[in-house]
Image (cartoon, rainbow, N blue to C red):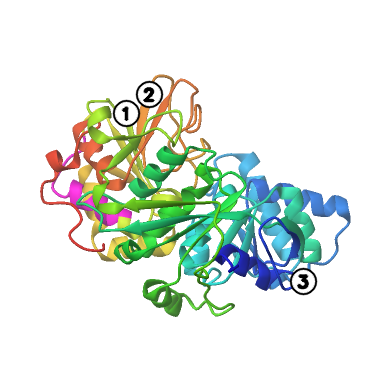
Amino acid sequence: MGFTMTEKIFAVHAQSGQARAGDIEILTPDVVLLNDTSGTITVEQLKKMGVDRLFDSEKVVLVADHFSPPKDVTSADAINLLRGFGNKFGIKNFYESGRHGIEHALLPELGKVGPGGLIFGADSHTCTAGALNACGVGFGSTDLAGVIATGELWVKVPRSIRVDFVGQPGRFVTGKDIILSLIAKIGVDGALNAALEFGGSGLANLNIDERMAIANMAVEAGADTCVFEYDEQVAQYIAQSGWAARQPVMPDADADYLARHTIDLQQLTPLVAAPPSPANGLPVAQVAETIVHQVYIGNCSNGTITDLRQAAQVLKGQTIAPNVRLIVVPATSAIYRQAAREGLLEILSAAGAGISLPTCGACFGGHMGILAAGEAAISTTNRNFRGRMGHADAKVYLANAWVAAAAAVAGKIVDPLTIAPQAGRKELV
């Protein structure tokens, strides 16, 4: 019996040199990722453990993104704790405001993620790494303290669920809609204790940004991790980023899967996930006319240059509705600069958007976009649980950037075609 991509990646990083679904293996990751929230717990645990040296400071990456820039003394102290930890142990990979980004978008840019790689992070959306033929796994902060101290952690190898894409997406369909459709189909626990593996002929019609949006939300289906097949687009990306740590992996023809799903991209329409679950993906028409008070375009799943281009397509020459606030957050400083060079920030600002430096702030209800009681937001973020972006009586609808931008103009959820008939998917953007 052949191997899945997940099994192959785990095997390369296992002490035993092998990995089969169901086995418990001791793994050594290529990268350990800490941020300024859960990462601070890891730092405190290391202190309690009396650790005076790390297994490999070059493999540790520290990113201040959740409370960056700090909103109060508590968050400033948390970032300072992370910075001090980096200085103490000679960790060169420390990133904060102005020269940083949201961790899961930043790591690929830095060449820290690529084919065959294994990334451990103190954040559930570490699975975003799967877009680049890697495995990213989120762990608890104490688990990661052990990894940083010893360089290893025992992990149960998950079984894999195969998802094949066929066809070409329609005009306003994006990676966001693809993952929302999958979660609606299998549920928030449909991939529980499993890995999602993506491939198929339709993969060629999805750029890396869209794959990152899909991979990012694999955890919203309950998956431990995910991985996309390697292809020319991944090859081109890593040629620019500089990843060279591992070799690409592909599944064996006779690999064993827990389940198989096929998604015909041509049959999809733009979806909106109604609160309080990412599994509540509905066609735009079913939630049309829903009044929104805030539109948020950003996050580790959908703050890419592709998302900003899509938003600008809709907002060019438009003005947002008077009772709406539009917040745009490029996922990294490099994306911010590229958007500036392309004139996207000018278009967005002229329409009435407030443009932020990279931060996770509003997505998890931290700062810079909190919702009041009774307010509704449409957002390109990845979670819409009760209280996720602010008050427990606020509502969050998840959508792609085209749909979100159209709502900013209309003041309510609408088909983007009604606002921007010139926009939509003409080619990979």
Residue indicated by mark 1? 293
Q: Is residue 171 left or right of residue 247?
A: left
**Which of 125/285 is in front?**
285
Quarter occupied by residue 233: bottom left
Q: Amino acid at mark 1?
A: His
Residue indicated by mark 3? 16
Disc nearer the start of the sequence (1/2)? 1
What numbered label is drawn on residue 375? Answer: 2
Q: Amino acid at mark 3?
A: Ser
* Residue 5 makes an appearance in the image: yes
Which residue is located at x 67 percent, y 52 percent? 80
Q: Which residues are magenta?
A: 307-320
Q: Is 35 one of the magenta-colored residues?
A: no
Q: Could you give the CA–CA distance between mark 1 and mark 3, rounded to whole angstroms?
A: 54 Å
Judged from this view, the residue extending furthest toward the left is 421
Quarter occupied by residue 256: bottom right
Which residue is located at x 51 percent, y 68 percent? 251
Classify 45 as above or below 129: above
Q: Is 315 one of the magenta-colored residues?
A: yes
Where residue 113 sits in the image (x, y, percent)? 54, 68
Label 2 element class: loop
Where residue 102 sits in the image (x, y, percent)? 50, 55
Disc nearer the start of the sequence (1/3)? 3
Does the residue at mark 1 contact the one at mark 2 (Cβ under 8 Å)? yes
Q: How many labels, in total?
A: 3
Counting other residues with Cα less than 10 Å from the Cα at mark 1, is it few (<14), some (14-19), or many (20 or more)?
A: many
